[in-house]
Amino acid sequence: MKHIELKYPLLLIHGAGFRDKTMGINYWGRIPRYLAEQGVAVHYGGTDAWGTLESNGEMVKRAILETLDKTGAEKVNIIAHSKGGLEARYAISCLGMDSRVASLTTMSTPHRGVKAMNTALQLPLWLYRPASVLANLWSRILGDGGPDFFRGSRQLAEYFCTEFNRKYPDKPGILYQSYASKLKYFFGDPAYLLTWILVKIFDGDNDGLCPVESAKWGEFRGIITTQGYFGVSHAGILDLYRVPYKGVRIPELYVAIAKELAGKGL
């Protein structure tokens, strides 16, 4: 079988709540193995589970430079999930990494924010701050150096992302493309039962966290879902569960993305 020959190395940037490896579990499921079998070496962003866009953006910059130093390449291809897509955009548009990035592919990234978060942020601070303390404690256990759930989570609200997009427009010369995932009903993934309902009310179709419309950025490549009644959740799109889906094979989707990048000379 002919291997995929990327011109630029592949860097994976994870989303919120987890790290690249959490308690021995790879955030990206079987995807790195499938890519490796096709000759694609995978590099990781090493960002915090609950860092702010700014602090994690600095980590993305560091990961880009370390990957270039390790491989001798001029640029990287980035695939980012969820909040990681915003952090990659911050590194590109604010931290001078536009000359070091050939492409950015985002998977279920809330580029336009989440309207439901606007409502959640109206909760009294005496409720929100204790939740932030617990989330920060969990993140430190996972290995975060400076988690900030209070600020990091608020940066996913629609009003914040509207301003973020105004301040940090895309840079020319970079391929921006995106995918959305979609849970068809609340029972499609019990982990997102409540959040799916809330986001459905305020934002419409979603994967349990990210609205489909918010995930569209650059060249929109489509909605990843299944045949039947379930669909693909926010965790499902990154193969966290390592289970087969009816009509879609998640690891092979990432292999297809790598093949397309190679075909574009990237």
Image: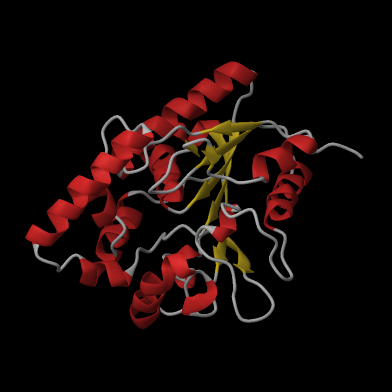
Q: Is residue 266 visible?
A: no
Residue at 57% x, 60% y: name it: 236
Q: State the quadrant of the N terminus.
A: top right
Residue at 39% x, 31% y: name it: 59
Q: Is residue 91 visible?
A: yes
Q: Quadrant of residue 122?
A: bottom left
Left or right, residue 23 beside residue 67: left
Left or right, residue 206 beside residue 252: left
Which of the pair 16/92 is nearer the observer? 16
Left or right, residue 168 beside residue 147: right
Task: Count the labels in the image.
Answer: 0
The answer to whether 165 is drawn above or below residue 74 in the figure is below
Furthest-right residue in view? 1
The answer to whether 238 is drawn above or below residue 53 in the figure is below
User: Which colour style is shown?
Assistant: secondary structure
Q: Quadrant of residue 174?
A: top right
Q: Position of residue 92 (x, y in %)?
A: 44, 39
Q: Position of residue 193 (x, y in %)?
A: 42, 73
The answer to whether 73 is drawn above or below residue 191 in the figure is above
Which of the pair 185/218 is nearer the observer? 185
Q: Position of residue 166 (x, y in %)?
A: 32, 56
Which of the pair 126/160 is nearer the observer? 126
Q: State the quadrant of the C terminus.
A: top right
Q: Position of residue 74 (x, y in %)?
A: 61, 25
Left or right, residue 54 beside residue 20: left
The answer to whether 77 is drawn above or below residue 159 in the figure is above
Residue at 50% x, 29% y: name it: 64
